Every structure is written in C-alpha cells, then in structure tokens.
Amino acid sequence: MNFERAVGEKQRGLEFLTRTPMERLLVYGRTCHFPKGTVIGSGDELSEAAYFILSGSCELRRGLPGAGEATIEAFGVGTVFGALDVPGGIEGWTGGGVERGEAGAPVCAVATADSVLLRIERKNLEKLRPQQDHPGPNGNGNHFQHGESRVWGVETRGGAVGPRRLGSRVVTLAFLSKHLPAGLISRQLASSLRAETASSVVLVRFEPSEGGSAYVGGYAEGKATAVDWAPSEVVLQGQFGMASSLFRTEAGFHLLTLNARLETTSPQSIASLVDQLSRQFRHVLIEAVADETPTDSVTELLLRSDLGYLLLEATTEDVYRVDLALREVRPRSAKGEGWIKPIVCLAEGEQIAGFDLLIQRVAKPVHLFVHNCPKVESGGGRVPGDGASEAGSHGRFRADVRRLAREVGGRWVGLALSSGAAKGFSHIGVIQVLEENGIEVDVVAGASIGAYIGSVWSHGHDGTECEKLARELEGRWRLWSLIDPVFPPRQGFVRGMATKRRLMRTIGTARFADLVRPMRIVAGNLATLERATFASGEVATAVHASVAVPGICVPVTIDGETYIDGGVVDPLPVDLLRDMGVARVIAVNAIPSPDRVRYALQAEKELKRLNENRTRELLRKVLPLEQQLNFFARGNLFEIVVRSVHGAQVGLAEASSRLADVVLRPNLFDDRWLDCRNPGRFIALGREAAERHLEELKALAAGKEPHHEMERPSEPMASIA
C-alpha cells in the first residue's frame, strides 16, 4: 500500500476523537508542549499513542531530523495521527512496520511550530470510540479540511499569521461582595456587549480546579468537543493548567477560564495576560472576585484597565471596600477619576435609602445601579449555568447590564437638556420624536427646566405623558399655581416649594436609584459659584435647587450647602455627559441667540405698528396697570433679572453646543421666559427641530464600531503561576 495513502486512512480512522466531548478526553489523555523542531516521537512511540493537535503544526517525516528527511504528511490544528493497529483501523502502514516506510527509512513526527498536543494511549482509544461514528461537516468525519484551521470562530488557511494590534479596551469587573452573582453578571455583560458592538469580546475568569475544565463555555454540558476546545491552546500554548480553556460561546463571546488563583497571580503575569488578550480582542472583560478586601492582584488589574467597575451591595462594608480600592488605585494612576466607577447592585424590592449619599461622601458618587440583581448566599458569588437562569432573565436586570455593555462598547447616547424656562417645553417635542423613531437614550443631564422635564422622563413617563402634564399649565392663570410668595422677600420673592410639590405629584419621593434611566441634575453652588452635579438623594429636591432662579426664587439649602439655578453655571451640560463616558451626545438648546431675539423684537414692533390702536395706547399710558402690578411684565424686576441671566447663558450654551455630536435648536425667537399659557407651541417647535435632524439622529444612534475579526497569534501567552 502507498505510504502516504496509508497515513491518510489511519488519520480518518481516528477522526472520532474530534467529536468526543473534551471532558472525556481529559480523563484519558494528557497535554504535551513541543517547541518548534522537537521530535514528538518515532518508531514504537508513534504506535503506542494517538496525538491530537490542539495548537501549532506537525509533520510526519522519513529519516532523522537533519539527515535529508522527506515530509510524508503535514498535520494542522484539529487533526489526529499515530496509534497503529487500532481496532477497526488498518493493520500496519506498509512493509517493515512503523520504523521503516516503503523505502525502509525510519519515520518520525516533528513539531514544525510551537505545538500543544493531546496524547492518548492506544489502550484508551477503544474506551473513547463511540459505537457508531457520525460524519462531520465535510462528510468524512473530519471537522477541518486539510491546511485549514479554525481560530476564534474564523477559518484561516495556510497556517499561522502574526497578531494584529487593535484599539482594544480592557475592563475589570471587581466584585467586592461574595453575595453578588459574579459569573451571571459577567456573562450577561459579555453577551450584551457582543450583541451591541458585533466586535470580538473575551471574558476572563479565574477558576482554580483540580479536575477538568469547570465551564463548557456555553455549550451543553458534556458536548464541547476537542475541536471546540482546541482554540484555547492557540493562545494558551500549554502555559496554563489543564483546566484552563477558551471557548467561543453560543452568545458569540469567548470565555477564557484560567486554572489559577487571582490572589496568587503575579503582576508580571497579569501584565502579560492583559497585553496578549489586547492583541487578539477588541473588548477584554476580566472578572475579579474579592470576597473580603481588594487584593494586590485586583488592584493591578484595575491599574491595567481602561475602565474599572467596582460592583458592590448597598452595605457599609462594601462602602469601606470601595474606599479601600480607591485609596490603592488613586496614587498610582495618572488617568484621573472618571475611569473607575462604583456600580451598586440592588436586589428585587431593595431600597437604596441613604446609602447613595453615604458612598458619595466616603468615596465617590455611584455611577449606575443594577436593579433586581439576584443574590448568592454561598459559593463565592458564582452562579452555575450559562447565564440563562430564571434570575438572570428579569427584564430590569438585563436592561441595566445591557446599559453597562453599551457604555463599555462606546455606544452610550446621552441627551443634554438646556435651561430656558417656558421655552424648555420644546424638550418634550424632541423626546417624542426620539421615542417614535426608536432612538435609545442611555443617560440624561439637565439644568433648570431641562432638569424638571428630564427627571419626569427618566422616571418612566413617556413623551405623551410629559405633554399631558405640561398642558395642565395652559391658561392665563395656571402659572400662578406655581407661585408661593415669600414675605419678607429677603432672598427671593418665590419659595419654589409649589414647583417641587407639583413635580412630586408625578414622581413622588423617588431617588436617583429609582429612575429607569440614569439622570444627572445641575445646580449652582451659591458660595463657590461652581457647578454642582446631583446623582444621589431625592430627585425632586435636586430639581428644586436647579430651578431656583437667583433674585426671584429663594436659594435651596441641601446638607448645609446653598444652591441656585443650574442654568447660571451650566445651561447645557454636555461636558457633564462627556465626563461620564458618554460617546454620543444630543444637545437640545432652547436658549435663543441674540440674533433671534433681535429679529423677534423687530417683528413685534412692526406688528404693533400695523395693528396700533391709539385709544388703547393712550389708556395704557394714563393707567399703566400692567407695568405697575405685574412684576413679570417687560421692563419690570423679574423680567430684568431673568433677561440678565439669559444674557450670561447664551455664550455658555453656545460653547457647550460645540461639544455635542448633534445640536437641536428649536426655532425660538421671542424671549418671553414665562409664556406657559401655550406649551403646545413649544412642544411643536421641539418636534420640528428633531424631525429636521432625524437622519443625523438615526445615524448617531446606529453607528457601530468597526468589526474586528481575530487572527491567530504568533507567540504564546506568558505563564500565570
């Protein structure tokens, strides 16, 4: 029989190994690492065992290395060779047995690249052989065609290629409580990130194990074959323990499970791990569980990350752990504060109470809340399974984790709502158009009237409900329901409590943690004249401070600090959203420019001249009741104060607009700031502005990052030990 043909037939006789669950192979085989040029075996060694190539490549040759050998057959990832006289196979290759080929020359197998092989003794092959062999995808039982290898779920031909450096993002998920379902949250985040970005994602978990692989990576238990498992060794190159594995899950992300303890992993190994994965994946998520206090390894991972999430429960112990982690990281990082963010996980029905204020005072404000998060009573914060458990399927939980994934993937869309008094009703029209066209907004920031409308929307009321609430102010005298005079008017003429009570009729005593959409509210610190950002506490109280127009409303005191209208310091908080990590910002600027105001005044004078009634004008001059009794009339105290504030806001709002991706400017020309009698007019103008820029808005929301497919690395990962 022709020697090459015999080798091919023998290979096909062992193809059942490629369809055998990896957990079974691990029981009967062991991995061996062979550097390039190493002789794997010759003579009887090739007869005593079968070799499954997990990574690298090998050749079967006649003669010894360096002595004019000839290549008989080349083998790549996912192929099997060796094991003569396997029952059901051929009896010997050709004359002279394995030591001698047809020409009588000795035969050996050589590693032609750094390779990892699974060696299975011939005596164990019959235990692994199924009763009935089913053909593989190419019809002959082989999962790979000759010269072809599957890496990261992508088929490549012709052998290894070098790594391609990408603009990758490394994110550490530091779980500071053992009662949090770290595995469930991590997998849900990785799955959502893959779905949102369609780019390569790997989730890294540290799971020391004395047995086989602790997780089958999204495949049904016992169904992950050696071919599925092989890509892990393309990266790992045999440097980790047997339980270390890398799978492409059914959700599309890769799961790398390392047989190592995080707390005993050296900084050098962490650096090597992060560097190597960054070369291969667009997004690297590293799950780091710190049951008690953050370890040096967790700190090292955070320092080497582009984004660090500190996930915690609403307990004082976890506040202490956050403070400890920040104390370790801050002095050693030159990235500022914005990259490391506390994430509070709340169980179903759990109230935040005053915990959000506590963590803000001790450490830093809570970045986001994950609601309806299942808790783990034991087991180190891990939930077995593939992430499709009943607990993880809760809509609010999945929506909050998805919002985290959108931030990681640079998909966040933020909406900045400006001040502008009654003209701010135009924000409602914009919101309606966004909802009608399915344009998702992840976070809202608002000042003054923008804070009021944004808080109602973020509480869960849609654009239609917002319009209904706004139209309750229609009519000549409805505005007076918001006026609660102060006597004596030492700090202002209006207390502002009526506005707060009206808001509380809609959202109650909701705290920021209760909102369905993250919200940031801007106010001005009267003592320091700095911008104050509210992200914790009671929402209505923060809005009360943000609408306190200086000179008209009494300043609002919260926790010993006095605040005034947010529009004074930041009328359009675009940079606040940028500081949060929002990649795409829509700004609604309801503050008319001086040119538009000038045009409106000229038009008003022209209309007045055309419709002049001399008798009425004479009566107004003789009995100027409007000017004498109405403090809001043009030229009176309130109007002068507000116009002065407006003048300061114009320049600030224009500067902020330049930081946004899309700016919506409703066609507002008049400067009557308290024209609440017809909110429908402003709402219509907001709709018109959004519809005018609808294609831009859709493009902004739909834009995705470039899709990167992974190529096979040319170098092994460093050892973790």
Image: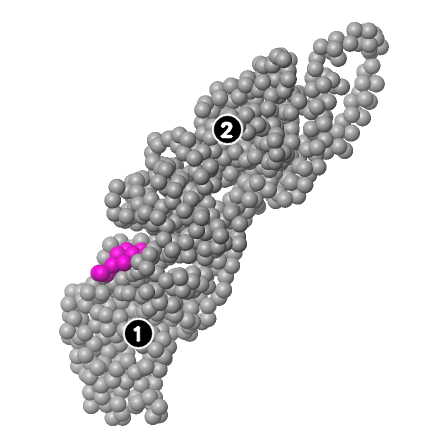
| Chosen colour scheme | one colour
User: Residue 325 vs residue 660: left or right?
Assistant: left
Please say whether residue 251 is one of the residues in the magenta stretch. no
Viewer-nearest residue: 250 or 376 = 376
**Residue at the spot 26% in from the left edge and 56% down from the top edge:** 214
> Along the polypeptide, which appears first: circle 1 or circle 2?
1
Q: Residue at x 27, y 62 (%)?
A: 243
Question: Label for residue 559?
Answer: 2
> Magenta span covers which residues?
206-217
Q: What percent of the width, then of the height, locates residue 176?
A: 36, 46
Q: Nearer the viewer, residue 641 or 200?
A: 641
Judged by depth in the image, the label closer to the viewer, 1 or 2, is 2
The quadrant the C terminus occupies is: bottom left
Is residue 230 depicted above or below 447 in this figure?
Answer: below
Q: Which residue does the numbered mark 1 point to in the structure image?
A: 33
Q: CA distance from mark 1 to mark 2?
A: 64 Å
Q: Amino acid at mark 1?
A: His
In the rendering, at what x and y percent does residue 378 appear?
A: 25, 44
Q: Report whether 692 appears left or right of 392.
A: right
Which element carries disc 1, helix, strand or loop? Answer: strand
Q: Main secondary structure of the magenta part?
A: loop
What residue is shown at x 72% (from left), y 26% (from top)? 643
- Residue 709 image offset from top left, x and y in percent: 46, 61
Q: Amino acid at mark 2?
A: Asp
